Amino acid sequence: DIPVGIVDPRNVTGLPESVRTDLGKGKELMKRVVLRLRESKRTFDDLVRVREVARIQLEAEEEARTRAELDLYQEKLRNESQARDVTAAEDFTKTSKKELKRLEVLVKAADKSRDEARAKLAVEEATVKEMQVKYADYE
């Protein structure tokens, strides 16, 4: 099970026992390092996936905020055009102001969600960068 080009220290003649032992320990150390590198790679890949999920979540929150903002502006435009009609403006304005407040609350909630998603993405990106540095040390 020894790769081609690698000498099995048990088959080398004329080496002191301490050298053979050291070679065996080195071989075991190399195996542990390879296993750690594989585990680090899996951990790194998992972190990258988490970061991508956070990025997708941020994009969804930004899209929701944009939709809420568009609804708010459309309501404002509708409010302004209805306000020109004085006879209908009184009833409409009361309802529209409530709707404006509701939509403004939605925009604020979307802002908060977007900020939370942005913060989560920043944390995940920092974690990935740390892992990249650690992973680079193993290479």
Image (cartoon, rainbow, N blue to C red):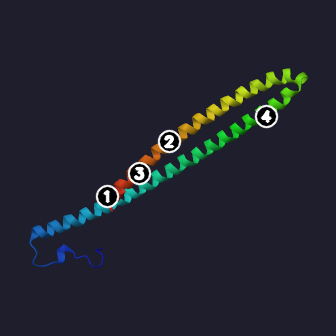
104 lies left or right of 116 = right
**What is the spatial separation of the Cα atoms under label 3 and label 2, in whole angstroms?**
14 Å
Which structural element holds mark 4?
A: helix
Q: Which mark is residue 137?
A: 1
**Rendered-image quadrant of the C terminus:** bottom left
Q: Residue type at mark 4: give it.
A: Leu
Badge 1 or badge 2: first in the primary sequence: 2
Residue 92 location (% of width, % of height): 84, 24
**Label 1 to label 2, Cα distance in Å?**
26 Å
User: Where's residue 83, x and y in %?
Assistant: 84, 26
When the figure is inspected, residue 135 is found, relative to residue 3, above or below; the finding is above
Q: Which mark is residue 120?
A: 2
Which one is in front in this view, the residue at disc 4 or the one at disc 2?
Answer: 4
Instruction: Measure the C-alpha gap from mark 4 to mark 2.
Output: 35 Å
Density class for disc 2 (Cα within 10 Å; few <14, some 14-19, many ≥20) is some
Q: Residues within 10 Å of mark 1 (few under 14, many from 20)?
A: few
Q: Is residue 136 above or below residue 13?
A: above
Q: Nearer the viewer, mark 3 or mark 4?
A: 4
Residue at image mark 3: 129
Give me the C-alpha separation between circle 3 and circle 4. 46 Å
Q: Secondary structure at mark 2?
A: helix
Q: Which badge, 3 or 4, comes first in the chain's sequence?
A: 4
Q: Which mark is residue 77?
A: 4
Image marks 3 and 4: residues in contact by CB distance under 8 Å: no
- Residue appearing at x 10%, y 67% in the figure: 18
Q: Earlier in the sequence, mark 1 or mark 3?
A: 3
Identified at 88% across, 23% down, the residue is 86
Question: Real-space Cα distance between discs 1 and 4?
Answer: 58 Å
